[in-house]
Amino acid sequence: MPRQSRRVVITGTGTVTPFGLGTGALWSALCEGRSGIAPCRTFDFSGFPTSFVAQVPEGAFDVKAVVPKSYRKAAKVMARDIELAVGAAMEAMNEAGLQTKAHETGSVTIPPERFGCHIGAGLIAAEENELTSALATARGADGAFDFGAWGGEGMKNLTPLWMLKYLPNMLACHVTIIHDCQGPSNTITCAEASSLLSIGESMRVIGRGDADACISGGAESKTNLMGMMRQHYARRVASTAPGEDPATVVRPFAPDAKGCVPGEGGGLLVLEAMETAKARGATPLAELAGFGASQSFCPDTLGVEPEPDGQGIADAIEAALADAGIGPDAVDAVIPFGTGVPMLDRAERAALERVFGARAPKVPLVTLAPAIGNAGAGNGAIAAAVASRCITEQRLPARINTRGAQGLDADACPARAAKVDTVLVFTPSLGGQNAAAVLRRIA
């Protein structure tokens, strides 16, 4: 028995990545085989294994330029993660051809009460200067940090609205206010799986008739001291040598893979019921045909070390395929997490072999991490946006860096034309949550 009575389609995508604002900019860079990884320009990471990150270029994105004039003051209480989500949401709405409250035209395409919002978020890192300037005022007589002084006086030196910048639900909060989305809304914080899980929730909400459309995805910035530290202790960060070319560091599924680098990015999709899109004359980019989720058993219980046999990841993939009503043979391309972190690559490889069997070496992989690093909660939605482009363009972007990926179609190659009717996207995460989605060409 089908889980939902309505088909769900993607009518708009928006991304903010190291290639700037818009899925078009990201797609062009991927097809050209460019990398957005470079030395960090905002922090001194010399004490870490690498100083390379994947940042949005300076001047390439200004959140004040994409919000209504009446809302620009609110940018003062937007952490970087929120800015990325707000920018990606506006791009997605525009690509979908939707009029919302944000466009200030006096009319809206979809009634606000029928428009939902589900956005994945990470552990937002506080701005170091803002936090440490307050911490410095909480020293005891011996000069050391004093919890009593912090509770009595130090906290008062934070700005009154400080907390509103760093609550994970603020991504969805700002997006729903800007666009007046009054339908079902939620925030999911499951590390790198967050945005695909959010897309899956939107799919179910629309499918069962609780909304006609949703803005869905996720965003996160890990290009900060806290983000780098978390990735370092999770053993995700590549060690690099002085003078090494940052564009060649991340090598998914390669025998010499040595890790990833922190990134920042956001991806938001406009999902609609098929009949809603047709009624307003929209041209869907792809159908969101299936979704699946699972929890891996992690040997260390924390999810730092994934299960090497890939069983949990395979469970999510198989659930998504079953939800779409297809078998593995129908998949034309796969976009994995593919970070170049050996223990993660090993688990993903095992999952692909479990699901595709003897066909695993023949299914082309689209690897994004060499270009955008690990964008945390933004990863899955960015991947879904790329998948929709693969379908509309009937083309697979270039792969870079990887050599000798035995048993998988993951080695470096140029962009090429391809028959792409069905794309599988999947994302495991730190913590063990897994999400998978099937995007399908609309006949």
Image (cartoon, rainbow, N blue to C red):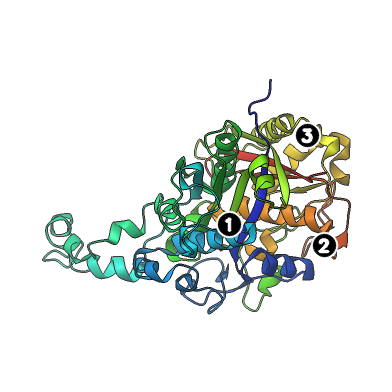
Q: Disc number at residue 412?
A: 2
Which residue is under mark 3? 355
SS at circle 3: helix
Tell me residue 360's x, y (percent): 84, 41
Q: Is residue 237 visible?
A: no
Figure quadrant of the N terminus: top right
Q: Disc number at residue 438?
A: none
Does the CB distance between marks 1 and 2 fall below 8 Å?
no
Tell me residue 346's x, y (percent): 71, 44
Q: Which amino acid does label 1 sit on?
A: Leu
SS at circle 1: loop
Q: Quadrant of residue 367?
A: bottom right
SS at circle 2: loop
**Viewed as shown, does residue 158 lie left or right of 62?**
left
**Viewed as shown, does residue 87 lie left or right of 354?**
left
- In the image, 29 versus 306, the foreground residue is 29
Question: Which residue ends up furthest to the front in the rendered image?
Answer: 106
Residue drawn at x 43%, y 45% as measured from the top left? 182
Figure quadrant of the C terminus: top right
Does the CB distance between marks 1 and 3 fall below 8 Å?
no
Q: Residues within 10 Å of mark 2 (few under 14, many from 20)?
A: some
Tell me residue 412's x, y (percent): 82, 62
User: Cα distance, mark 1 to mark 2?
Assistant: 38 Å
User: Cα distance, mark 3 to mark 2?
Assistant: 23 Å
Q: Disc number at residue 98?
A: 1
- In the image, 234 versus 175, the foreground residue is 175
Which tag, 1 or 2, sits closer to the chain's start?
1
